[in-house]
Image (cartoon, rainbow, N blue to C red):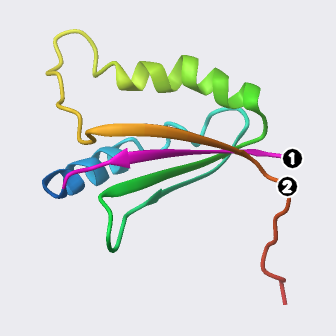
Amino acid sequence: MSVVKINVLTVPAEQREVLEQRFASRAGSVENSDGFEWFELLRPVEGTDQYLVYTRWRSEEDFTAWMEGPMKAAHQGGGEGAPKQRPAASGSTLWSFEVVQQAAPKKG
């Protein structure tokens, strides 16, 4: 079954909009990756300053290939001469899971 990667990002209140805009502007960059199955950016609603970036992959190898290729290139900036962007998150932790059960709504 699939693997899930959840990146826990600590984002100060004044950087929330910046983070969300950066994710919106990168739309399509992960979706076309081999083995990609799902993405969600989860905004905290109370009691925390941590966003969750949820991705699901066909295999650990597919996730690793994306991390070492397209993701690495995307996080290195916009190329030579492009202004360096200040990080929107002040910390990051990666959680890894294997999917052992899943359910989907019944189609009626």
Question: Residues at badges 2 and 1 in contact (C-beta under 8 Å)?
Answer: yes
Query: Which amino acid is tagged 1?
Result: Met
Task: Please give the label number shown on residue 100.
Answer: 2
Q: Position of residue 98 (x, y in %)?
A: 77, 46
Say above or below: 4 vs 13.
above
Mark 1 nearby-residue class (10 Å; few <14, some 14–19, many ≥20): few
Q: Quadrant of the C terminus?
A: bottom right
Which residue sits at x=65%, y=24%? 64
- Disc 2 to disc 1, how far (Cα)? 7 Å
Residue sitting at 49 percent across and 27 percent down? 71
Q: Nearer the viewer, residue 76 or 42?
A: 42
Residue 62 percent coordinates (x, y) = 72, 29
Q: Is residue 47 above or below residue 24?
A: below
The span picked out in magenta is 1-12
Position of residue 4 in the picture relative to residue 89 (left or right): right
Tell whether 13 sits left or right of 63. left
Which residue sits furthest front? 47
| Circle number at residue 1 | 1
Categorize mark 2 by other alpha carbons within 10 Å: few (<14), some (14-19), many (20+). few
The magenta stretch spans residue 80: no
Query: Quick check: 79 left or right of 42?
Result: left
Judge depth for marks 2 and 1 and give the one in front: 2
Q: Is residue 97 above or below residue 84?
A: below
Tell me the kind of residue under disc 2.
Val
Question: In which image quadrant can residue 58 be found?
Answer: top right
Q: Position of residue 103 (x, y in %)?
A: 82, 71
Q: Main secondary structure of the magenta part?
A: strand
Q: Secondary structure at mark 1?
A: loop
Q: Position of residue 80 (x, y in %)?
A: 23, 9
**Earlier residue among tags 2 and 1:** 1
